[in-house]
Image (cartoon, grey):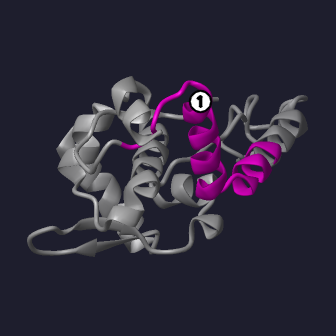
Amino acid sequence: MRLTTKGRFAVTAMMDLALRGEEGPVALAGVAERQSISLSYLEQLFGKLRRYKLVDSVRGPGGGYRIARPLERVTVADIIRAVDEHLDATQCGGQENCQDEHRCMTHDLWSTLNAKMFEYLASVTLADLVDREKVKAAARGEAVISGPLGPHPRRVVREKAVALA
């Protein structure tokens, strides 16, 4: 059982968008640079996120993407589902043919784990993640955002935070 880079990158990119959303549409090139994710890979992910109505695209100069719903209404589970990510701890993919075409003795254990993982991911919203990041950054004496094309939130220059204080 593991979350692949597709799900991790989608959540990371959505969080980047959420942190910068008040500034207007966010260019994927900026997200790619800040998060060290391939631009072409992000374009594929954002196509899926757009079809799932989690983001809107804005064309033209100053265009980019913005989150389509209030942050409180976008869960991590929504993002993972939108990019076709399947978290499954069962050996059989839920088909109950784990052991010689029969259900294995631990199938219920892994199925329950699947349910608990999605329950947890459905309880965490982008608003929760953004709030946590802002609290952590403040505790470090850093600003979370230093501009639309600024550095990765974890690499924010301390002078920026001092200038804001």
Q: Is residue 71 above or below residue 133?
A: below
Q: Position of residue 124 (x, y in %)?
A: 70, 52
Q: Position of residue 40 (x, y in %)?
A: 18, 46
Read off the magenta span: 116-145
Judge by depth and name the residue closer to the eye, 132 or 46. Answer: 132
Q: Position of residue 75 (x, y in %)?
A: 63, 59
- The residue that appears at 38% across and 72% down in the rendered structure is 51
Q: Is residue 47 above or below residue 101?
A: below
- The residue that appears at 71% across and 46% down in the rendered structure is 94
Q: Is residue 153 magenta?
A: no
Q: Is residue 129 magenta?
A: yes
Most extreme residue toward the left is 61
Q: Position of residue 102 (x, y in %)?
A: 80, 37
- The residue that appears at 71% across and 56% down in the rendered structure is 122
Q: Is residue 60 above or below residue 41?
A: below
Residue at numbered disc 1: 2
- The residue that appears at 49% across and 61% down in the rendered structure is 82
Q: Quadrant of the N terminus?
A: top right
Judge by depth and name the residue closer to the eye, 100 or 41. Answer: 41
